[in-house]
Amino acid sequence: MAGSEAAGRPAPAYVLGIDLGTTSVKAALLVGAERGQSVAESCSRETRAHTGSLEAGPQGMEQNVQTIMRALNECLAALPQQQLQRVSHIGISGQMHGIVFWRKEKGCKWTECGTGPAFEPEEVSHLVTWQDGRCSPTFLSSLPVPQSHVSLATGFGCATVYWYLKKRLKKSGFPVHLLPEVGDPGSIAGRTICAWHGIPKGAKVGIALGDFQCSVYSCLTERTDAVLNISTAAQLTISMPPGFQPPETPDASSAVTYFPYFNGDYLAVAASLNGGNVLATFVNMVTRWIEELGLQIQESAIYTKIIKAALAQNDSQLSVHPTIFGERHVPEQLASVTNIAVSDLSLGHVTRALCRGIIENLCSMLPVQRLLETGVRRILGSGSALARNKVLRQEVERIFPFPVVYGKDIDAAVGAAMVMFHRK
């Protein structure tokens, strides 16, 4: 870089991608090159933002916005200042479907930190996330039918707004003025009003994008690829043919949703609510049992031990249907364990069966036969749960009759930056 500047060539401009995820935030700096873009630097921080909801009760899933933004500021502060000073565009993605409210003109305040001005949320509500379960099937059935091919589900922002309206007001129409304007992906929402962690004043900021589409955009180059992501939740995705249009009316019983993608295309998505969160719940359950026996073991150590135990068991006759969080197309569905035999009661057998159940559940939503009919030739595997769990990877390769490629840079922050890079 120094040599380029010394030779009289201008220093390269960077595009910053930010992803506000369910469990962590990530920032990625992309720089242009003759053969495309490359990730120059990236940083992530866990948010640890979950907070209880007295109003919604145990079904509520909310996050503290101040905690999320604190993690974002820490993330940006860890990136090299000299590169942030060359950022010309910012792309933003975040967890989809949830909602947060703020007072107009008082959504944030600017404060000074070690790297210069930073903004913090001021008069804002908690974030009601996509995992929120306060809207029961009965409540959802009482709402107007959406003029969309996508069915309404608990955790969707509009459903949450209706829940607040009906809980606090006797009669009220939907506050349409709260909804954001819809723009083209990559279009500019505005510019930074002052320097921010070294990012220059006037940097162009793109409109917010869904983290799911950005994740797919970061890796999907061939229509014959399917993308399997297992993080907090799990998704299996395929590209629909050019010109495809989804049905005009929603089918609440369908396990597949058609998500709008870039350039007028659509993705067929089996979006399961049960992924890494199921394994996390299982580990938490084992931890509580151990504590009740008067012992103490760190959850991280338990996770390592149960995966090791499962790797020692090549098979298990146990059948685990792991839908403890329900599914949007069958929200009342619970989890179950069947085919229990004395020979399959070890921790390794149960863990192996649980991992297989997560993959089988996803496969039941978007079957192998449909993948074959669509022309899928390989699967791109991604996500934190899949990356750290060899048993999950073994079960993916056992169930799907396609080559599975791991290690692809499937990353919403990178995807958000790529969208802005390609449209700047």
Image (spheres, grey):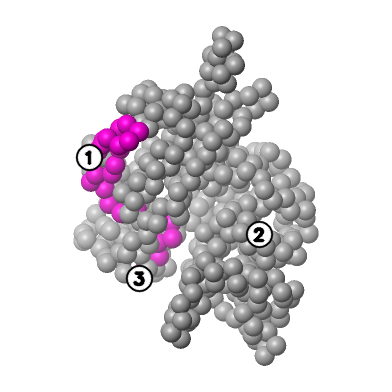
Q: Residue 170: name its quadrant.
A: bottom left
Which type of secondary structure does the marked residue at label 1 adopt?
Answer: loop
Report the disc number at residue 106: 1
Residue type beneath disc 3: Pro
Q: Which residue is mark 3?
A: 58
Taking the spot 72% from the left edge, 50% from the top edge, the residue there is 405
Which callout, 1 or 3, points at the residue further toward the start of the chain?
Answer: 3
Residue interval drawn in magenta: 109-135
Which type of secondary structure does the marked residue at label 2 adopt?
Answer: loop
Taking the spot 47% from the left edge, 32% from the top edge, the residue there is 80
Residue 134 is covered by the magenta coloring: yes
- Distance from disc 3 to disc 2, alpha carbons, whole Å, reads 30 Å
Which callout, 3 or 2, points at the residue further toward the start of the chain?
Answer: 3
Q: How many marks?
A: 3
Name the residue furthest bottom: 342
Q: Which residue is mark 2?
A: 366
